[in-house]
Image (cartoon, rainbow, N blue to C red):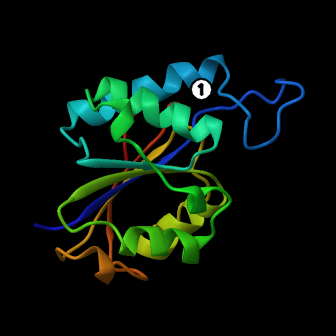
Amino acid sequence: MAKQLVLVRHGKSDWAAGGTTDFERPLNHRGNKNAPEMAERMSKLDLIPDLLVSSPAKRAITTARHFSETWNIPKENILKEPTIYEANTTALLAVINKIDQQYNRVALFGHNPGLTEFVNYLADAHIYNMPTASVVYIDFPFDDWSLVSHHTGSLLLFDYPKNTGAV
């Protein structure tokens, strides 16, 4: 079965949360509202992944938990991958290339600018910026995660909270 990757940028974070490190910055009200909304949009398209992989940063893991709740996936099943935090394309590709072959559709929750650059690298997507809580869905024409590389994917969906019609 072809491999499919869902990339999700964390929801809007709370810059006013004083005394917190970047890593510990929480989602703000809008971030906590948008994440379940976007997960619901994915559900309506029947694009629920087999595996959720997230940066352990508070705003990313909280976003992943909102998605897992909407998708009825136990929160304990979210795989925390420390290298996603502040990752560039090379680091993100290494995470994808080592995913267990039993999973065919995987969601990765992370951060910008890494995610936007990664989408463009994988699918030649020409996306200028993935807004907070945005979702990208990429399809690959093979059944082996280790084959995922530069321009091997096809962008099937780019959606974000303020979008009135998915691209």
| Position above or below: 114 against 36 | below
| Position above or below: 18 against 160 | above
Label 1, residues with CA under 10 Å away: few <14, some 14-19, many ≥20: many
Relative horizontal placement of residue 140, taking residue 87 as reference (left or right): left
Quadrant occupied by the N terminus: bottom left
Residue 156 vs residue 133, the one in the foreground: 133
| Position above or below: 94 against 56 | below
| Position above or below: 138 against 130 | below
Q: Quadrant of residue 20?
A: top right
Q: Percent x, y for residue 7?
A: 43, 53
Relative horizontal placement of residue 130, taking residue 4 as reference (left or right): right
Q: Amino acid at mark 1?
A: Gly
Q: Is residue 89 visible?
A: yes
Q: Which residue is mark 1?
A: 31
Residue furthest to the right: 19
Q: Residue at x 20, y 60 (%)?
A: 104
Q: Percent x, y for residue 43?
A: 24, 32
